[in-house]
Amino acid sequence: MAIGIDASRAFEAAPTGIGVYATQVCRGLIASPPAQLRLYRNARQAPLAAPPLSAGSEWCLIPLPRGWTRLRLALEVRRRPPELLFVPAYRLPPGRLPRSVVTVHGVEHRLAAQAYPGASGQAVESFVKDALARAARLIVPSETTRADLVQLYSADPATITVIPHGVAAELGPRGPDQVAAVTARLAIPGPYFLVVGAHHRRKNIPFLIRAFASAFPAGRERPWLVVANASGPSASELAQVSQVAGCSDQLRLLPHLDGEALAALYSGALAACVPSLYEGFGLPALEAMACGAPLLAGDVGGVAEVAAGAALLVDLGSHREWVEALTRLAMEPGLRSHLGRLGLARASRYSWERSVEDHSLLLADELARARRDQFR
């Protein structure tokens, strides 16, 4: 079998950014494979959302409740080694491997270390170091991440290829009627700011809630703050923060949303906010711009690279600057329109079709190198 792909993060029901990336790349490679594929999956059946496989390709269904990469995937790769292994999410299986390509999405665990306490940061650090030591090539989503790997790990830049993410086909500007229908269904009764992604501390949403409360104090008409993809412990924590800050009556916490609802929310927002401490890329920022939303974000990391010249970028260390930025965006429709136009133009540079094509070319090249190595 030519190329083995760890597809364990692809086609998830409620994907994070890495899951979105794995799904889009796997879907594109399945639809137009650079060679025969073997897709490893921690499940008993192939995903219904995946395209049909071409002749010669196959799903390798190897479920295991715990330790899947370390035990089950490692065993399968040793038992039936592909010529090339592609891992879209950091972590190589242990042991002897064929020539390998790994995607490292960022080094947030180093540059936003306060969001990765104890074992969580140590685990990501070990995955990154292992990928640098054993992979023939690394894929990264931004020049920012490439530079971070070179600076922090003395990585060889010649082994790192930048392939940016794209925007899902269902994400784009929506009209007023579509926005009104979605906001009514989700019980958002007035103007709102939107932030997407509450599942990790590095998203820094408590900071945004406090800035929002300062910008729009109680006792006067004020907008809503909508947090999408908030569920479980993170939602409870954010609700508590809003109570202390005095804006709980203007906070709307939503679960994971489908693409159509998310596009409508982006399209109708006063602004999309990305207060992340650090991101290797910043997919929500790109998705917001693709829907025409004005973007307010921190001036660091991959988000600043992706949104360069098309967003209101603010110092993440300054509560005052975020309060002022939120106030301006609420009060200045001209600024919102200007940023929306800039964002649409900026987002048009990114597409999953181009990203998949670049992945396919890279994997085909690495497969050719693996085959040449067999005869040395």
Image: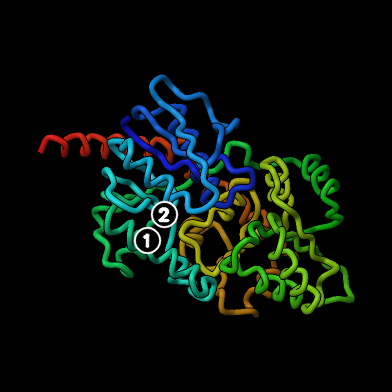
Give amino acid for label 1.
Val
Residue annotated with mark 2? 90
User: Residue lying furthest top in this view?
Assistant: 55
Residue type, numbered disc 2? Tyr
Q: Quadrant of residue 273?
A: bottom right
Q: Which of these two is toward me, 154 or 63?
A: 63
Q: Mark 1 to mark 2: distance in Å? A: 7 Å
Q: Secondary structure at mark 2?
A: loop
Which residue is depicted at the point 59% across and 43% down?
A: 12
> Does residue 131 show up?
yes
From what the image shows, is residue 135 above or below residue 23?
Answer: below
Give the percent coordinates (x, y) of residue 271.
68, 59
Location of residue 350 in the rendering, given as x and y in whole percent from the top left corner: 48, 44
Kindly identify which residue carries mark 1: 128
Q: Nearer the viewer, residue 88 or 301?
A: 88
Residue 374: percent from the left, percent from the top?
16, 36
Is residue 130 left or right of 65 when viewed as pictured?
Answer: left
Q: How is this picture coloured?
A: rainbow
In this view, which residue lies farthest toward the right? 219
Residue at 52%, 57% in the rendered image: 282
Q: Are marks 1 and 2 in contact (CB under 8 Å)?
A: yes
| Residue at far left of view | 376
Q: Quadrant of the N terminus?
A: top left
Q: Quadrant of residue 336?
A: bottom right
